[in-house]
Amino acid sequence: MGTHEQEFDRIRPFLDRATRLFLLPKKVDLRGGGNFVREGPNIIIGNHCGSYKDVSILLRNVPRMIYFTANQMIFTREGASELVLRHLRRHMGTLGGFVHVILRPFYNFMVDYISGHIAAIGTIPVDIYGSKRESIIKCQDYLTKGRAVIALQGRGRVHPKEPHPYVKEFRRGVSIMAYNLRRESGLDVPVTPLSFYGTHIMWGVPATIRVNVGPPLFIRDHWTGEEASTVEAFRAALQRTVAGLFRESLSW
């Protein structure tokens, strides 16, 4: 097996076809694309309400190779299949189980392909119910090597009971990474904020997906000299910025 980059190039034709399929028949209105960081370390952070559609848009629009953090369940056939079933039931109720059975050969192929290649292209597994320490360390290693890491916030769906259903409260992981890298190595990583709206709409339903990309934020602008307050200030700023980008996109 070659490098992550070589493996990504090898499966790029498949990813191109798959991401086109995942986004059918939707249109994508992406603004602020010039704010993407084209080289050097970068974290891309945003809300996550459209599961695979959010990922597909990033793969098709970020102008460099990107490394995702992802639920560790999708690294196995059993875990990925369970996530597909949950998604169908969430959107289709009891009918989702029936659709899952009918389309099982297609899903099995997709699940086998994705779970079999996701580690090879450098995707970072995250235990969404447990400790994030190992994934944070892995992300920091990637960033010191000049890579771009995706850290979407949320679980790939709308949360109707939350104060902001589309922008779930951000976790501290990205802020911790930025703090550690600046303190330990003087590396001030640009964190690019973006928002999604429309990716929550079920596959096959026509809609326009709005993606709003803002200029990078830096933890140096929120540095207090103390870890806890710096991490919280930057976390809050990132969430506030993405929420603002989201609200702005609603007026398009």
Image (cartoon, rainbow, N blue to C red):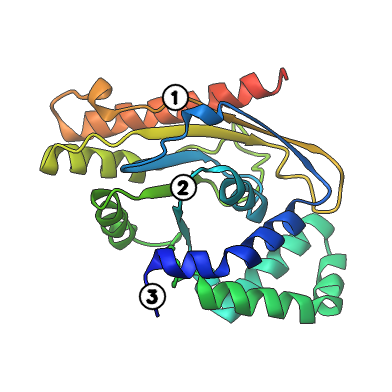
Residue visible at 21% across and 24% down in the picture: 223
The residue to which callout 2 is attached is 64
Residue visible at 27% across and 39% down in the picture: 178
Look at the numbered disc 3 and give the secondary structure of its residue.
Answer: loop
Residue visible at 55% across and 26% down in the picture: 243
Q: Which class describes the residues within 10 Å of circle 2: few (<14), some (14-19), or many (20+)?
A: some
Residue 47 spot, x, y in % from top left = 55, 39
Observer-nearest residue: 170 or 37? 37
> Is 215 on the left-hand or right-hand side of 94?
left
Q: Which class describes the residues within 10 Å of circle 1: few (<14), some (14-19), or many (20+)?
A: some
Whether residue 122 is visible to the viewer of this picture, yes or no, is no
- Picture layout, residue 51 above or below residue 244: below
- Picture layout, residue 241 above or below residue 119: above
Observer-nearest residue: 164 or 110? 110
The mark that comes first in sequence, 2 or 1, is: 2
The residue to which callout 3 is attached is 2
Labelled disc at residue 215: 1
Look at the numbered disc 1 and give the secondary structure of its residue.
Answer: loop
Residue visible at 56% across and 26% down in the picture: 32
Query: Mark 2 and mark 1: span between their CA atoms?
Result: 17 Å
Identified by mark 2, the residue type is: Arg
Identified by mark 3, the residue type is: Gly
> Is 205 on the left-hand or right-hand side of 221?
right
- Picture layout, residue 238 above or below residue 14: above
Residue 164 spot, x, y in % from top left = 60, 31
In the picture, the quarter occupied by the C terminus is top right
